[in-house]
Amino acid sequence: MTTRLLLAIETSCDETAVAVVGDDLGVRSSVVASQVDLHASFGGVVPELASRAHIETITQVVARALDDAGATGSDLDAVGVTSGPGLVGALLVGIATAKSLALGWGVPVVGVNHLEGHLASVYLADRSVPFPQVALLVSGGHCMLTRALAPGRYTLLGETVDDSVGEAYDKVARFLGLGYPGGPVLDRLAGEGEDTLGFPRPMLAEGYAFSFSGLKTAVVNHVRAHPEVGETEVAASFVAAAMDVLCAKIRRALEEFGDPAVAIVGGVAASPVLRARAEALAGEFGARLLIPPQAMATDNAAMIGVAAWHRLAASGPSDPGFGPEPDLRLRFS
Ligand code: KG4
Ligand code: ZN
């Protein structure tokens, strides 16, 4: 049987990404054009600039992804695209492109929830994925602990009541003058210091909810009161506090449900500190650690392609009138 091919597009934030993914979930190509340099001097993503950059680069990125896959339009059987959540103008560019390509090629198009894309990114490391999973989604915009019961079927255990952990990373990094995005830099500095400052571990004992804005404030207050404190000590102490909270919640869920697998997805899953701690925690419970390859933890279209195949199998193509849903949430069972 020949493999069918799907072209996937992701433009929800500041990466213009296109991938070609087979219905065997094999990734034939994955191209990510990052706008980080464009937004860096503003200390965060500027929505208007993001939309403009997407429209300028998307056709080249589609052409590269097709070329890398050794495919042309006539080889494609479907198109998948992120429909939300994200920046409305940025999403519009991806959706308009996806619909046009699907129309031109005479193939169906399916809208994908970006969060479902992250949850599907574990398939990019290993295509045999056990369920149920305790699944932690930690990105710039989201921080939630779920149980994945099957592809596309989740229950919510808890989420952040204020900032996401990625947002806390970015805000602390910006305060320290480390640039945007802050995750990778803070993580690297943390590896050079020790957790000596004992920052608070917010909501450690409270079920499955998270809160990170108090931790960020504690860091800012400490640095203001002690301007001589070393950057590496601050980074190490912040990262240790954030990771302690994430790991405590995963531990609680593994104790409560005894699931055979734990999944860690979203941009913060690129953190070597989180990857090492999750590995140790999974090992302790005899659970399998499901985690995307480091380069596929942050936004990419390959994960959208995997989720698009799951969506097509579960509910078929999207209604042709679908549009961007900036506040789209995950649907929980
Ligand atoms: O999933 P993602 O690429 O975009 C959203 O869907 O939000 O996540 C981006 C977030 C940013 O907050 C960034 O600082 C964080 O992921 N991040 C990291 C690392 N790489 C990216 N956080 C910690 N360590 C990293 N190595
Ligand atoms: Zn994302």
Image (cartoon, rainbow, N blue to C red):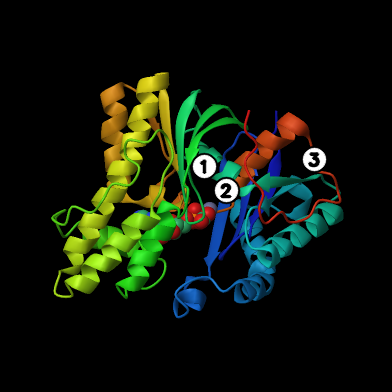
Per the image, label 1 sits on a secondary structure element best described as helix
Residue 317: mark: 3
311 vs 207, nearest the viewer: 207
Q: Amino acid at mark 1?
A: Ser
Label 3 within 8 A of ligand 2 by Cβ: no
Answer with the quarter of the image where residue 191 lies: bottom left
Per the image, label 2 sits on a secondary structure element best described as helix
CA gap between label 2 and label 3 equals 18 Å
**Residue 65 percent across, percent down from the top left:** 62, 57
**Residue 146 percent across, percent down from the top left:** 50, 34
Dividing the image into 4 quarters, which one contains the N terminus?
A: top right
Q: From the viewer's perspective, is residue 94 above or below residue 150? A: below
Residue 121: mark: 1
Asked whether residue 294 is in view, the answer is no
| Residue designated by label 2 | 302
Q: What residue appears at the point 17 percent right and 62 percent down from the top-left corner?
A: 233
Q: Nearer the viewer, mark 2 or mark 3?
A: 3
Q: From the viewer's perspective, is residue 236 above or below residue 333? A: below
104 vs 249, nearest the viewer: 249
Residue 288: mark: none
